[in-house]
Amino acid sequence: MSGIKTYQETAVTTQNKGKLIVMLYDSAIKFLKMAIKEIEANNPQKKGEYISKALDILFELNSVLDMEAGGEVATNLRKLYLFMGRHLTEANTEQDTGKIEEVIKLLEELNQSWKAIA
């Protein structure tokens, strides 16, 4: 089992920045889709865990933004990440799959852009 974990960690640390961002978006989308399934299954604890994982990813994406080099793009991404974080916090409290789906849509659009770049 530790060999698999080591491989996964190595795969992540050796990816270029664009591919790593795509991996983060993919993971956030996956977690949010799982959260929707847990809401539908009336399992608030698991739903909260998946939303928390997605929020952690958004926090990480936001924290690595280079505001000086990124200029207006970085500023707009920061605003978008903060919006998504608020939206997911509300969705978590309100058990609102619609808000989660809105964030998934935004993440999918960003992800397609990064895939084109990476």
Image (spheres, rainbow, N blue to C red):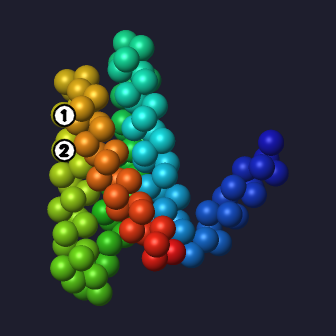
Residue 57 location (% of width, % of height): 40, 52
Residue 103 location (% of width, % of height): 28, 45
Give residue 43's quadrant in the image.
Answer: top left
Give residue 76's quadrant in the image.
Answer: bottom left
Of the residues shown, which amino acid type is indicated by label 1? Glu
Label 1, residues with CA under 10 Å away: few <14, some 14-19, many ≥20 = some
Residue occupying the point 30% across, 38% down:
101
Of the residues shown, which amino acid type is indicated by label 2? Arg
Q: Nearer the viewer, residue 84 or 40?
A: 40
**Residue ID for mark 1:** 90
Residue 72 vertical position relative to residue 64 in the rendered view, above or below: below
Give residue 45's quadrant in the image.
Answer: top left
Label 2, residues with CA under 10 Å away: few <14, some 14-19, many ≥20 = few
Residue 45 visible in image:
no
Residue 59 location (% of width, % of height): 33, 55
Task: Please give left or right for residue 56 compared with residue 10 in the image.
Answer: left
**Residue ID for mark 2:** 86
Residue occupying the point 51% across, 75% down:
118
